[in-house]
Amino acid sequence: MSDQQQTSPEEENVAAQAAAEQTTETETEDTKTVDAVQAEIEGLTAQLTEAKDQALRAQADAQNARRRAEQDVEKAHKFGQEKLVGDLLPVIDNLERALDSMNVEDEALKSVVEGIELTLKSFQDTLTKHSVIAVNPAGEPFDPQHHQAMTMVPNPDVEPNTVIDVFQKGYTLHGRLVRPAMVVVSKAVE
């Protein structure tokens, strides 16, 4: 070998150190690259999770809106007749008052009484068919949700806060109060 081709041990050490430093730099760059890729994966995973959550929330909101709309339509069908029912109730009241004021025993009025009774029954049957129910609370405990107290009368024969007379029947439509019953309520004797 020639002098130029031979290397001294010092030169070999310097070359080995340079090679080791180059390997360390490459490993450090690879580690940085792996760390960067892992960080990017974690970021994308978080974004995906957030996007899925937003999609689920949007789907739930749409389903809730659909359900509310269906309930609103159902209520409109059920209670859309409420004003009409309220307007027809005085007709029933008047027919009942007419029957109460007539002498049922009078032969001359028998056909008129029968006609009013049939008209009233037909009217009541039609309202019942459309879920209009009369509230006639005579003898029941007073319920401010369904009854309107017109007066309170002391009565030792019944419990206090009991309906003892009904001036005017109340009515409900599909369970919702259309008109409260006007009642006389008992109170304790002083």
Image (cartoon, helix red, strand yellow):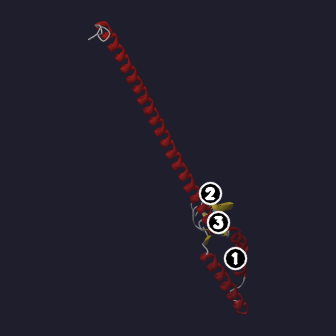
For marks 1 and 2, the one nearer the N-term is 1
- Relative height, residue 151 to residue 46 (above, below): below
How far apart marks 1 and 3 lie (CA) works out to 25 Å
Can the viewer see residue 106?
Answer: no
Residue under pointer 2: 189
Residue under pointer 3: 76
Q: Residue at x 38, y 19 (%)?
A: 22
Q: Position of residue 120 (x, y in %)?
A: 67, 81
Dot 2 falls on a residue whose secondary structure is loop
Q: Amino acid at mark 1?
A: Ile
Which residue is at the front of the view, 2 or 120? 2
Q: Residue at x 64, y 64 (%)?
A: 177
Number of the label disc, if any, that sits on residue 12 = none
Q: Nearer the viewer, mark 1 or mark 3?
A: 3
Residue under pointer 1: 92
Q: Taking 105 as reference, is 19 left or right?
A: left
